């Protein structure tokens, strides 16, 4: 539980992910939670089969992007720490996104005229927060300057979400 709390602190820009050393069981539980929560969120938005495929593609892209980044920067030794840090924080954001979808449902059932605008606003906030978290992780682990870490985090977001989404639209 202490390790989880230390990883969750990354979502609030506390701790250095390079100092966290996750055991294999923790890493696999993080990936399992990512896959399950991703399938739930995507299943609420679209067809569950298509959503599950998109989550699988995002997972492959996330692992590949982290691996490529670390190989290019010659810091492969941080692979487990980096993907675990990103996935734990993404799981946290995904949980908040699930709560947002529940809130949206309640607002629609209550006939709130601003339900869609509120939900979209929270969604943009969560995406911005996610990019900031990934930027923080890159900056801490790879010692990137702020501008490079933000550009890298945005690129990571586009690669892990944009490409699978484009693939699903084909």
Image (tube, rainbow, N blue to C red):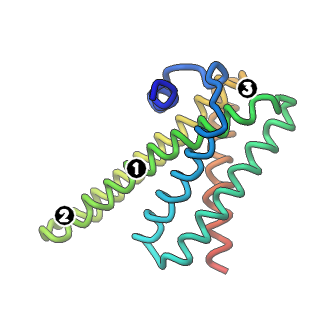
Residue at the spot 63% in from the left edge and 75% down from the top edge: 168
Residue toward you, 58 or 154 = 58
Distance CA(mark 1)–CA(mark 2)? 18 Å
Looking at the picture, does residue 161 appear above or below residue 43?
above
Q: Position of residue 32 (x, y in %)?
A: 56, 53
* Between marks 1 and 3 in the image, the one whose residue lies nearer the viewer: 1
Q: What is the x, y in percent for residue 102?
A: 28, 60
For mark 3, give the secondary structure. helix
User: Which is more N-terminal, label 2 or label 1?
Assistant: 1
For the point 44% across and 43% down, the residue is 92
Q: Is residue 170 above or below residue 132?
A: below
Q: Quadrant of residue 139?
A: top right
Tag 1 residue: 95
Q: Which residue is mark 2?
A: 107
What label does residue 142 carry, if any?
A: 3
Q: Residue at x 62, y 46 (%)?
A: 28
Secondary element under disc 1, as helix, strand or loop, is helix
- How many numbered badges does the structure rendering display? 3
Q: Is residue 82 left or right of residue 50?
A: right
Q: Is residue 79 left or right of residue 105?
A: right
Q: Is residue 31 left or right of residue 36?
A: right
Q: CA distance from mark 1 to mark 3?
A: 27 Å
Instruction: Look at 31% across and 54% down and name the residue there.
Output: 99
């Amino acid at each position: 539980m202490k390790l989880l709390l230390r990883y969750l602190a990354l979502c609030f820009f506390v701790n250095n992910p390079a100092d966290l050393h996750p055991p294999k069981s923790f890493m696999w539980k993080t990936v399992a939670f990512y896959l399950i929560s991703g399938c739930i969120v995507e299943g609420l938005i679209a067809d569950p089969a298509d959503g599950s495929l998109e989550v699988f593609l995002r997972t492959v892209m996330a692992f590949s992007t982290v691996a490529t980044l670390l190989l290019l920067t010659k810091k492969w030794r941080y692979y487990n720490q980096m993907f675990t840090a990103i996935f734990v924080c993404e799981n946290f954001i995904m949980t908040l996104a699930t709560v947002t979808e529940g809130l949206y449902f309640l607002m629609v059932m209550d006939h709130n005229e601003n339900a869609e605008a509120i939900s979209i606003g929270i969604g943009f906030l969560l995406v911005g927060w996610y990019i900031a978290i990934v930027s923080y992780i890159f900056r801490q682990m790879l010692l990137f300057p702020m501008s490079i870490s933000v550009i890298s985090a945005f690129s990571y977001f586009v690669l892990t979400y944009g490409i699978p989404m484009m693939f699903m639209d084909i």
